[in-house]
Image (tube, grey):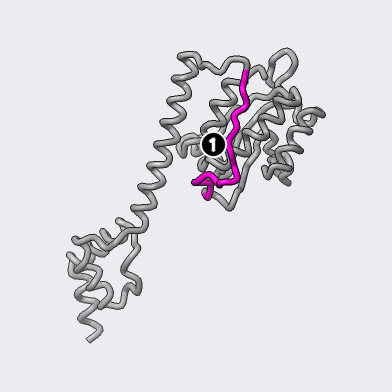
Amino acid sequence: MRYDKRNRIALDGLAPNTRAVAYKWYQFCLDNNIDILITETIRTKEKQAEYVKNGSSQTMKSWHLVGQALDFVPVTVAGWVDYNAYFRPDIQKAIAEAKRLGFKWGGDWKGSWDKPHLEYQYKGYGTDKKLDSLHVITKPLGDDDAMTAAEKKEFDELKATVRAQADRIKALEKQNSMEIPKWAEKAVQAAQAAGLIDTPKGGSEDFYRVLTVLYRGGLLITRAEDKH
């Protein structure tokens, strides 16, 4: 495998169960001398927005954002990547194995092909958080497992991106579903009394801020008094 080290660095960026299955597929490629380059796995929201803007992607809900997809390209005997070689017999063999393992291939899509794309839907979008006990990740060994300084730097940057993405998801989840803040309690009570809300708990920070602004402006009190 000409790009073995680079491929394994990319695979390490995947979500846990996707990574486990992807390594099984990669081992199949190694065992069958199917040469590929894995060009992308985890993707940042900023990069996805760039792809949508330039027409490379049609959605901001890419499986790459949650680490459940990879893109690959066939490699020729001379070592060149060949985006026209997805129907080469050995590559079709690799794709068939990926599908057997549970991946969806973008080349099967109707209307808009994405032949480099393999996605592992697991239990749904963004559900691949914790490794199932039935999966044991066995990383295929290359000719030389030691990474160069440049490769280690690239790998560390990739891990930092993954960590930042995970932290961002946690922050968004916390921000969009929180307990009633102390500073918003009176505003929430007034909104309930005015009949504006039924479920005060579990709102976002922005939701509570809007209620507080209305309350401090006297609007919620006025609505409550109008009911009597």
Numbered disc 1: secondary structure: loop
Is residue 57 visible to us here?
no
Residue 66, relative to residue 224: is it above or below? above
Q: Which quadrant: the C terminus?
A: bottom left
- Where does label 1 land, which residue? 14
Prevailing secondary structure of the magenta residues: loop
Instruction: Kindly identify the amino acid type of the residue bearing the numbered disc 1.
Output: Leu
Q: Residue at x 38, y 47 (%)?
A: 170
Is residue 39 visible to us here?
yes
Total labels: the figure holds 1
Residue 10, relative to residue 147: is it above or below? below
Q: Is residue 111 left or right of residue 149?
A: right
Characterize the local packing of mark 1: few (<14), some (14-19) or many (20 or more) Cα atoms within 10 angstroms: many
Tell which of 85 and 17 is nearer to you.
17
Q: Is residue 200 left or right of residue 131?
A: left
Tell which of 60 and 127 is nearer to you.
127
Q: Quadrant of residue 20?
A: top right
Q: Is residue 61 left or right of residue 153?
A: right
Magenta segment boundaries in residue numbering: 127-142
Q: Position of residue 219 (x, y in %)?
A: 22, 70
Tell which of 73 and 111 is nearer to you.
73
Q: Quadrant of residue 71?
A: top right
Q: Residue at x 67, y 29 (%)?
A: 27
Q: Residue at x 68, y 20 (%)?
A: 81
Q: Position of residue 45 (x, y in %)?
A: 46, 39
Q: Residue at x 47, y 24 (%)?
A: 155
Q: Position of residue 89 (x, y in %)?
A: 82, 29
